[in-house]
Amino acid sequence: MHAETIREAYLKASSFLRDKGVADSSANAELLLQHALGLDRTSLLLRWSEPFPAERETDWLRLLERKAAGEPAQYIIGEQEFYGLPFTVNRNVLIPRPETELLVERMIAEGNRLWPGGSPLLADVGTGSGAIPVSIAVHCPAWRVMSSDISAGALETARGNAERNGVGERVKFVQGDLLLPYIEQGTAIDLLVSNPPYISTGDMAGLQPEVRDYEPHSALDGGPEGLDLYRRMITQLAELPACPRVIGFEVGQGQAREVARMLGSAADWTAIDLVKDLAGIERHVVAVR
């Protein structure tokens, strides 16, 4: 697949990936090309007609082979942008999704409304790459932020992302199962946020190969109905010093109403909102009291 110019390399790569059945082949080719050449999009387009550097040829072909085999481009380049910030991603963590940005936005809005100019404690459960707590810490410098995960590999990645985005000192990461670290420390949580595993076990086999074969199953499988983690977290609420004033959960398609019902039976709330994502799916359940 020898290419003469950078533009030709892009066109050939796009065609190669399309032939291999890769979705969004053009976008993937461009992303990998930026990574291979160490260029941002503007620089890439400015150098479109320059010769493709021969010394990068072998690495470039290796990247394309990995993508053709189904590996997510974010794992290949080791990065994904979320809420305008760069996050390192690897096989220990899920790739942050755009719809989760809506949950971050809503938690920030609720916190600023209930604690104007204050410093509430936000606790995140299932940190993964750290996308949620790090984004909130960056945008809410007065807030106290904690985040937990059961996976040591995820916590290591999240800590690195907190450092990378300048909030390494401000986000406290703890290892443990769901709310247990907070219960054990007697933490009084003001805002609780979580994007837990919510795929039902039976649906795991039918996921896109990019997700099923590469992303960590422990961060995807939510039990027989996909609701196990919500059920356990909601039960654990009673063991905290007090029920948080705001709880925000990301949920799977068709799960929002049942999660809202479970939350409704756990405490008295002023409101429980179902928030739709950009595709019109009820994606977040936000309870406020």
Image (spheres, grey):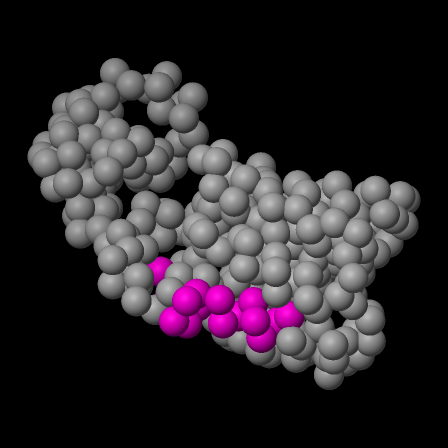
Q: Residue 134: tell me if it is visible.
A: no
Image quadrant where residue 206 sits: bottom left
Which quarter of the figure is the N terminus placed in? top left
Q: Would you say residue 110 is visible in this rendering?
A: yes
Q: Position of residue 209 (x, y in %)?
A: 24, 54
Magenta-tinted stretch: 214-234
Nearer to us in this view, 150 or 188: 188
Residue 224 lies in the magenta-colored region = yes
- Give the camera-side residue of 125 and 15: 125
Question: Which residue lies at the image location 43% right of the left edge and 21% below the top edge?
Answer: 42
Indicate the quadrant where residue 260 lies: bottom right
Looking at the image, residue 82 lies above or below residue 220: above
Q: Quadrant of the C terminus?
A: bottom right
Give the left or right position of residue 185, taking residue 96 as reference. Answer: right
Q: Is residue 62 left or right of residue 1?
A: right
Taking the magenta stretch, the answer to whether it contains residue 139 is no
* Residue occupying the point 20% across, 40% down: 22
The answer to whether residue 48 is above or below residue 238 is: above
Badge count: 0
Residue shown at the point (68%, 43%) measured from the top left: 106
Q: Position of residue 220 (x, y in %)?
A: 41, 63
Is the residue 199 above or below the residue 140 in the image?
A: below
Q: Position of residue 64 (x, y in %)?
A: 20, 43
